[in-house]
Amino acid sequence: MMRAVTLADDKVRELLNGYTVPCYASNDEFDPKKRRKLSQEDLDIWMSKIHAATLNAGFDSGNVCVYILSPDGKPVDGIIVAQACQPNVLIPRLEAAIKKHNVKKGDPLIKPALLSNPPKVKEDSRVAHLVARCTERAWMPTPAENCIVFDPEKQKKLLPGGNEKVGASWEIDKDVALEILCRFLPNIENTHFRIDRFKSHSLKATVVSIEKGTARARVEGSFEFKHDFYPGRPETANTSEGNVVGYIDFDPAQRNLKSLKLLAPAAKYGDMRFTVAVSSEP
């Protein structure tokens, strides 16, 4: 939400890049089992000098929060994300902190760059970009995004085992289908995807044309699975379900994927209505 709304605001970016040293950390970094970048020293600084100090100063504090610190590292403000994701709330709070400490505008210490990029893969792998956007009763108006990597082995599992003639049909490999469909969810809190809670699923492909070394197969299918709205809280689970259409372009001789396009035009998660689109990168 912050990236899609607040950080997309020109004024917010101007204030952050011109007057602050912005940084962020994933909540996964505070889980000892998942920690990759934060050292114990970093964790101690966060707990004592940022989280606790901000709370003691009377500001909002938590693990989903924006913290504004003075040049000497003392808390100036704390804003929960539910408020900070609104530019009209965050901008005056940033301006007040800048004015209070008489901060002069300067060049960014770190050159601004995209925060969401497709993963780097080997030349023989393909990346598909998935976007899910609520169309009705949205919990969040911003889309959910994800990337799915198809290495050569997974590409083969998308394709038929032979007999690539017009009219030939096949069921796409179960494991690959589940890896795709488990991400068919709107923008919710729980992004830990699971493949063991499916009630049903199918992805069937049928070759409709073969021209100039490229075969095109129409894809049709459906999905129905349980997914917790909040991670680790099964009582918040809803059912995600819908129908899927699309196509696969592939080289029948080399048995590699050229293009994958999928669409779930009328999916639902509980009482949320959403659309999912999957498109492989060129």
Image: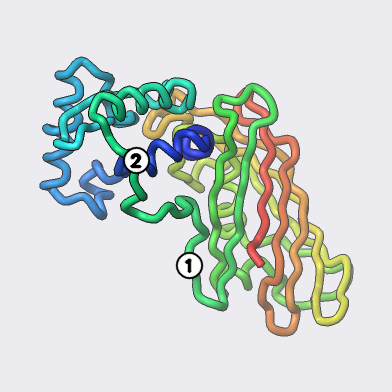
Which residue has dot 1 on it?
Answer: 120
| Quadrant of residue 269 within the rendered picture | top right
Determine crowd level at label 2: few under 14, some 14-19, many 20+ residues with C-alpha closer than 10 A: few
Secondary structure under badge 2? Answer: loop
Q: Is residue 250 left or right of residue 189?
A: right
Q: Residue at x 49, y 51 (%)?
A: 116
Name the amino acid type tagged 2.
Answer: Lys
Up/down of 75 relative to 3, above or below: above
Observer-nearest of 7 and 255: 7
Query: Cα distance, mark 2 to mark 1?
Result: 35 Å
Q: Which percent across, then down, holds residue 206?
A: 81, 63
Of callouts 2 and 1, the N-terminal one: 2
Picture disc at residue 18: none
Q: Is residue 121 left or right of residue 274?
A: left
Which residue has dot 2 on it?
Answer: 105
Q: Residue at x 30, y 43 (%)?
A: 21
Secondary structure under badge 1? Answer: loop
Name the amino acid type tagged 1.
Answer: Lys
| Quadrant of residue 111 within the rendered picture | bottom left
Q: Which percent across, then down, holds residue 207?
A: 83, 67
Q: Is residue 164 left or right of residue 88?
A: right
Q: Residue furthest bottom?
A: 253
Q: Residue at x 70, y 74 (%)?
A: 161
Q: How many marks?
A: 2
